[in-house]
Image (tube, helix red, strand yellow):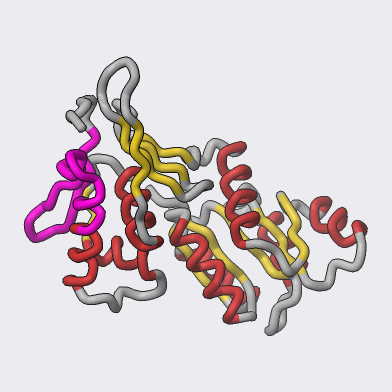
């Protein structure tokens, strides 16, 4: 099951940017603009990690939100990464870590770096985050999320290795399939992964992109099965199709 990340920031552009980054990493993203709203959403959702801006609109600052989170029995275990554009020196960073934060990033920062830090924290805490290199059981298909590459390997002692080119949306769809083998993924979920934000992409667009991925996979196209009336499923059986 995808991990839920709560993004608390009053800057809409940052929220949208981080939401897309979370989608690419297959995290489910919850957004809040104020400390008060963040605490409300935590009551209604089981959150796996929190990205918390220190400077927030509303009554509560990020520091106050962090204090409340670490005082409450039900939330003190949730990892928190502080982000701030006002950290003047290492004293602010030390203050955040001493207050219970797990990490501290100074704005501007790379969304990719933030995602890497989230995954490191969740992995350290037993969050079950998978490695960025995804592969089928027989290693006939290998996807590297860091280098944005997909390779198909043939059979034999010296198998031919072919790299295929995917668009960004196709890459996101395939990585989502490979992270959830043998699980039916409906079109709504696939749309959120590839296009982000709400489900507004018409069904035909999702089908078209899935068909394009299948075509580029060649003889491995049968890994993606259509589940009539529901969506698609990535079948990862321990077989090595001929290539």
**Vertical order, 114 against 192 (above or below):** above
Q: Position of residue 67 (x, y in %)?
A: 74, 61
Q: Position of residue 26 (x, y in %)?
A: 43, 54
Is residue 174 at least partly visible in the picture?
Answer: yes
| 185, 171: nearer the viewer | 171
Q: Position of residue 160 (x, y in %)?
A: 32, 29
| 142, 72: nearer the viewer | 142
At x 36%, y 64%, the residue is 194
At x 21%, y 76%, the residue is 202
Within the magenta stretch, is there residue 219? yes
119 horizontally vs 180: left or right: right
Within the magenta stretch, is there residue 229? yes
- The part of the image, by quadrant, that contains residue 166 is bottom left
Q: Position of residue 56 (x, y in %)?
A: 70, 78
221 horizontally vs 54: left or right: left
Which residue appears farthest toward the bottom when viewing the image?
58
At x 44%, y 61%, the residue is 23
**Vertical order, 175 against 28 (above or below):** above
Is residue 128 at least partly visible in the picture?
Answer: no
Magenta region: which residues? 212-236
| 141, 3: nearer the viewer | 141
**Vertical order, 194 against 10 (above or below):** above
Which residue appears farthest toward the top when viewing the image?
157
**Vertical order, 93 against 223 (above or below):** below
- The part of the image, by quadrant, that contains residue 7 is bottom right
200 horizontally vs 73: left or right: left
């Amino acid at each position: 099951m995808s991990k839920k990340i709560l993004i608390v920031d009053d800057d809409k552009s940052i929220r949208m940017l981080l939401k897309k980054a979370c989608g690419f990493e297959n995290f489910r993203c919850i957004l809040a603009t104020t400390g008060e709203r963040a605490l409300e959403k935590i009551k209604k959702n089981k959150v796996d990690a929190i990205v918390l801006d220190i400077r927030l609109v509303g009554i509560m600052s990020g520091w106050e939100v962090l204090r409340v989170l670490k005082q409450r029995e039900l939330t003190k275990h949730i990892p928190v990464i502080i982000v701030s554009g006002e950290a003047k020196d290492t004293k602010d960073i030390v203050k955040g870590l001493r207050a219970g934060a797990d990490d501290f990033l100074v704005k501007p920062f790379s969304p990719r770096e933030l995602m890497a830090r989230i995954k490191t924290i969740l992995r350290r805490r037993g969050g079950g985050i998978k490695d960025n290199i995804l592969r089928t059981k027989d290693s006939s298909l290998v996807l590297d999320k860091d280098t944005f590459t997909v390779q198909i390997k043939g059979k034999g002692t010296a198998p031919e290795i072919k790299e295929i080119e995917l668009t960004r949306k196709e890459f996101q769809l395939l990585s989502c399939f490979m992270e959830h083998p043998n699980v039916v993924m409906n079109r709504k979920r696939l749309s959120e992964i590839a296009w982000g934000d709400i489900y507004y992409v018409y069904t035909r667009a999702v089908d078209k992109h899935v068909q394009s991925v299948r075509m580029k996979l060649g003889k491995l196209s049968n890994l993606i099965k259509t589940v009539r009336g529901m969506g698609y499923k990535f079948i990862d059986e321990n077989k090595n199709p001929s290539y």
